Amino acid sequence: MNTDERNVKAIESRAYAETMAETIRESVIVLDEDLRIISANRAFLETFRVTRREIENRLLSEFSSGEWNIPALLSSLRNVVGPKVELRNYEISRDFPGAGQKFLVLNARQVASEDNSGRWILLAIDDRTEERRTIEDLRKQTELLQLAHDAIMVRDVDGVILFWNRGAQETYGWSPSEACGNISHQLLSTQFPEPFESWQEKLLSRGSWEGELVHLRKDGRRIHVASRQVLQHDQKGRTIGVLEINRDITSRKDAEEALRNLSGRLLQLQDEERRRIARELHDSTGQSLAALVIHLSAVSARITEIDLTASEMLREAIDLSQKASDETRTLSYLLYPPTLDHAGLRSALEWFIDGFTQRSKVKVDLDVSIGQERLAEIVERTLFRIVQESLTNIFRHSGSDTASVRITRRLGIVRLEVADKGKGIPDDVLAALNSSGGQLGVGIRGMRERVRQLGGWLQVKSRPDGTTIISSLPVE
Amino acid sequence: MAGLRILIVDDEKAVRTALGRLLGTREEWVVVGEAADGTEAIGKAKELKPDVVIMDVTLPELNGLAATPEIKKAIPSAEILIFTQHESSQIIREARNAGASGYLLKSQANWLVTAVEAMGQHKPFFGGKNLSAAR
């Protein structure tokens, strides 16, 4: 290859290099050994809002308002042409007139000068200002998450914890480094309100879930949390993880539990007190009044030869004492079922249902299959009260003209089912009944408290064609 | 009318005494004995062989409805009148099933003489609150 050919080749190479430099989006400038600007590409001119004339043949340190006059940078660049050390990822942050605050990453290497007589420096300037701003925003957001007292975590689609805020550390006792990388429901021994698979199915299909969970802390303490979970998607709409925010509601739950226990205990005490008064009325006052009627009747039978006025007065006395006796009996029956103590649950229910059907015209089918053995007094009383309350509700609200009461005993559990063929309980009413707040001690809530007091549980199943209330009580 | 031998069963002394006085208004009737619980009632009945037993329901040991069939078994001719504070159609049913011939509420004691007369004639007498108030 002769000199001409070589020159042509060199010119072609230079044109090619210039085209490349103009095309790429990174700012590129070429400096000579004195750090004088030889040339710059379009990206540089646009980024720093300068013209080619303003910069060419200017010293880097002097150009513009001296933003590039950074001694450490200049000395590093000199090293690129001296000991031939590359400059790698040198970060600077400067305010450029007209272009604003910029965060730049610089890379430089030595290249041969155009005429091969010297050495030049190719300086590539990567403007990372936008990226830096995004990271900064994220960092600020994360700081906000750290301020929250709620436990905030992010887990990926496999349940692996990726983010764990300070609130989560306070709530659960695990630090971010201990928690991240674990499967969240394993770490927290989560108790879901339904089987895990169906719970997860709900979250995935609806995109979010809200409810209560039970978790285990690092110190082994069990806590209740109110949880909100939302699926996170990438720009293409694929699920990439779940954001979970949990609030510790243990103390509220404990208070509710204590209130429920107290309420249940009060109902029991009220029953005991009523039973005592009913017995007293029936057996003591009632007997005295009965004896009074008998005595007066004896007087009436024995003394027939008195004047008509006296006879009339005696008749009135008998009437009054009879009335008092009947009222006493009615009152005692209202307070406590008369046959429950001495004749047992079945007799008491038969007695109650007899009267109930007479008053309400609701036909009740009673089936008690618990054998001859009596249940504990408190269990019989609780079951009786639940039947009483349920049948009263059926009469008042269901519109059903039939009902069934079924009591069975199996594997240490007595199960009571009271069913009707009425219109069912409206959804909003049912939801209110199943929620934890609201009025205590009345209706279905009262029944539930009585049952809980004995370690049992109560379910309400309601459909537009009828309602069934199932109480299950453990017995020895 | 032939004399009647009557056994009174009630755990309340005041009621037994009052009953004795009321029944004593009929000269041909004799109260042959009293019992305060179901077991005692069965023993007294076997011993005294009464024509009529006036039987309370709520009793210690054995209640009146449980003692009734035992007495009927031992002395089939004895008629048993359930005389109680308890008022329900169920208890009337149970009284019939136990073999009693009569049922009377204690507050309707002014009907007692009529009820015992029915027993003496081996006629049933089941009266609830619907009996007229005074007689």
Image (cartoon, rainbow, N blue to C red):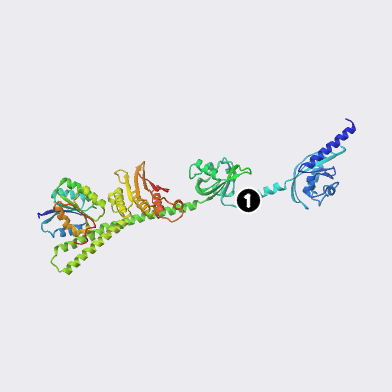
Q: Is residue A265 left or right of residue A73?
A: left
Residue sitting at x 30%, y 46%: A374
Q: Which residue is mark 1?
A: A143
Which of the pair A118/B28 is nearer the observer? B28
Residue A118 in the image: above or below residue B62: above
Element type where label 1 sits in the image: helix
Could you tell me if residue B14 is visible in this image? no
Residue B9 % position (x, y): 19, 53
Residue A426 horizontal/vertical position (percent): 44, 52
Numbered disc 1: what chain? Answer: A
Quadrant of residue A118 within the rendered picture: top right
Direction top: furthest residue: A1
Residue A323 image point, x, y percent: 25, 62
Q: Give the class, few, some or many, for how many residues have Cα within 10 Å of label 1's Cα (few <14, many ≥20).
A: few
Amino acid under label 1?
Glu
From the viewer's perspective, is A32 left or right of A94?
Answer: right
Name the side, left or right, on which A82 lies relative to A427.
Answer: right
